[in-house]
Amino acid sequence: MGEMNDGNVSEMGLLEFQEYCESVNVSEMDMHEFAMFCKKCTERWNNPQTEAERLVYEMAGNKKRKTNQEWLDLQKEVQEFLKTATEEDRNLIGGYTESLCMICSAIKEGLL
């Protein structure tokens, strides 16, 4: 992929953006370039553009502390979404559902 700028970052899907970030060699950046890279990463992560990205953000990126009921509601929302999700969306969400299931299981068992 080429150099990251405002235009192409906003056009990348979250999976594509994650792959891009993993391919960047930050050791070759000066402090300003690194700071801009971090800013772009944070902006992209905090601005989901699809329903799948929003659900990932809610599971992993949202800093708002959730109540137990909010976690259980999110699990139901994810389950409903996955019924009709594309393969790409399933791949995006897949890595986050395990932790969601563990949290909800702990809530249901009265551990949280």
Image: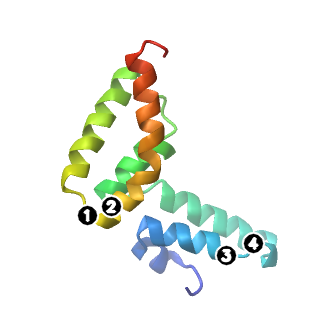
Amino acid at dot 4:
Val
In the image, which disc is placed on residue 33?
Answer: none
Q: How crowded is mark 2: few (under 14 residues within 10 Å), some or many (20 or more)?
A: some
How far across and down, in percent of the image, does residue 88 sit? 34, 66
Can see residue 63? yes
From this view, report whether residue 36 is shown above or below residue 60: below
Task: Give the number of the mark in front: 3 or 1.
Answer: 1
Q: Mark 3 points at which residue?
A: 24
Q: How far apart are marks 4 and 2 (CA)?
A: 28 Å
From this view, report whether residue 24 is shown above or below residue 57: below
Q: Name the residue under label 1.
A: 86
Amino acid at dot 3:
Val
Q: Name the residue under label 2.
A: 89
Q: How far apart are marks 4 and 1 (CA)?
A: 33 Å
The reply to whether callout 1 and callout 2 are in contact (CB within 8 Å) is: yes
Q: How far apart are marks 1 and 2 (CA)?
A: 5 Å
Q: Is mark 1 on a helix, strand or loop?
A: loop
Which of the two discs, 3 and 2, labels the residue nearer the N terminus? 3
